[in-house]
Amino acid sequence: MKRFAQLNARKAWILFLVLNAFSMVIFGQETGGGSGSSSSTTTTTSTQTTWYASPWVWVVGGIVLLLIILSLVRGNTTTSTKETIITTKDD
């Protein structure tokens, strides 16, 4: 029976320590507690824009695409015709 009581006392002590550690972690993460301490947080943000997010890139890309499509549709309109004239002499 003594052993069982000692085992329960050890488990209770370990449970107390674990729960106490959890409470220290939780209360340690609070900001603006009640003990009169003040803290200020400064947040700086930087924005990065990618090159394809700019409107002028889309306009230039659209113009280039339109020129490519027009040149493909137009095709080769220069046609060269060769005329061969054959003359025969009858005697």
Image (tube, rainbow, N blue to C red):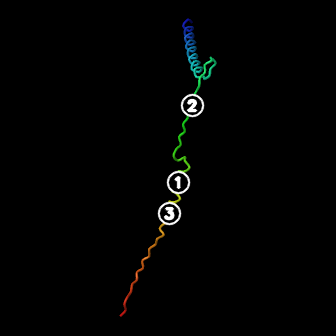
Q: Amino acid at mark 3?
A: Ser
Secondary structure beneath label 2: loop
Q: Is residue 63 above or below residue 88?
A: above
- Tell me the tag on residue 71: 3
Q: Is residue 67 above or below residue 13?
A: below
Quadrant (top left/top right/bottom left/bottom right) for the C terminus: bottom left
Quadrant (top left/top right/bottom left/bottom right) for the N terminus: top right
Residue 55 appears at what percent x and percent y?
Answer: 56, 49
Residue 33 appears at what percent x and percent y?
Answer: 62, 20
Q: Amino acid at mark 2?
A: Thr
Q: Amino acid at mark 1?
A: Val
Pointer 1 residue: 60
Using the numbered discs, state the Cα–Cα distance from disc 1 to disc 2 in whole angstroms. Answer: 37 Å
Q: Is residue 78 above or below residue 35?
A: below
Pointer 2 residue: 43
N-terminal-most mark, 1 or 3: 1
Quadrant in the rendering for residue 82: bottom left
- Tell me the tag on residue 85: none
Q: Nearer the viewer, residue 24 or 61?
A: 61
